[in-house]
Image (cartoon, rainbow, N blue to C red):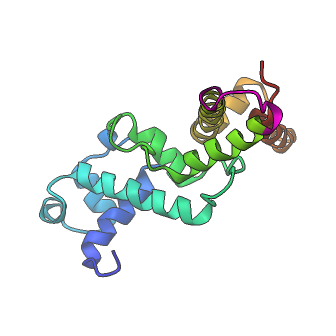
Amino acid sequence: MKDDPPARQALVSAAKAMLPERAPSSVSGRELATRAGVNYGLIHHYFGGKDAVFREAVLELRAEFLETHSEHHLPDLVEAGDPFLRAIGRSQVDYPNELGPGDDFPIGEAMVRDISVRIRAAHPDWSDRQIGVEAKARSVAMLAVQLGFGLYRDMLLDTVDAKTGERAEIEHALCCVYRNLARRPTS
């Protein structure tokens, strides 16, 4: 990407900036080119169409997310405005099976691994299958909180009538709830 022509990288950068706020289908190719400060024809020249620009933008946001957040241990509830988490949510509108974390999402794998260790310590009599299913269920719940809060933070806080002075405290409490998903008592 460092060797990419400047116009090509400008298109990807513009898509990265737009994705956290809008689904790709709500952005025209001309709007994307204008935001990038390049000629509209360069979208087709470099990518074949605007969808490919947005797909590449998500991959770059993913790489940046993984650089920022460790892939080797259970992640904390990340900042609600994280561009990758917001982009994943927005892009799912247009690319439901293409832009998700996928099978090789290291943070999801790390969550399952860490939670499995915790469950095994608490329930040494459980089978590997029982532990795996429980760890994956807890990981899915934690990822749902990550993505949902990342996308809908303001709406969710407004829904519970969170006052300006309470929002930080509510977010702190949510972080505790989030961490407890990994440690919750198992039935």
Q: Quadrant of residue 130?
A: top right
- Image quarter (top left, top right, bottom left or bottom right) of the C terminus: top right
Total tally of numbered discs in the picture: 0
> Residue 109's spot in the image, x, y percent?
56, 47
> Residue 53's spot in the image, x, y percent?
28, 56
What's the residue at 63%, 40% (across, down)? 146
Numbered range of the magenta stretch: 121-130
Indicate whether 35 appears above or below 133: below
**In the rendered image, is residue 62 in sight?**
yes
> Residue 40's spot in the image, x, y percent?
18, 61
Indicate whether 74 appears above or below 174: below
Q: Quadrant of residue 160?
A: top right
What's the residue at 25%, 48% (across, down)? 51
126 part of magenta stretch: yes
- Image quarter (top left, top right, bottom left or bottom right) of the N terminus: bottom left
Decide if residue 176 is on the left or right side of residue 98. right
46 part of magenta stretch: no
Q: Quadrant of residue 124?
A: top right
Decide if residue 134 is on the left or right side of residue 53. right
> Residue 181's spot in the image, x, y percent?
75, 33
Along the line of sight, which residue is nearer the eye, 118 or 129?
129
Decide if residue 164 is on the left or right side of residue 24. right
What's the residue at 40%, 36% (across, down)? 92
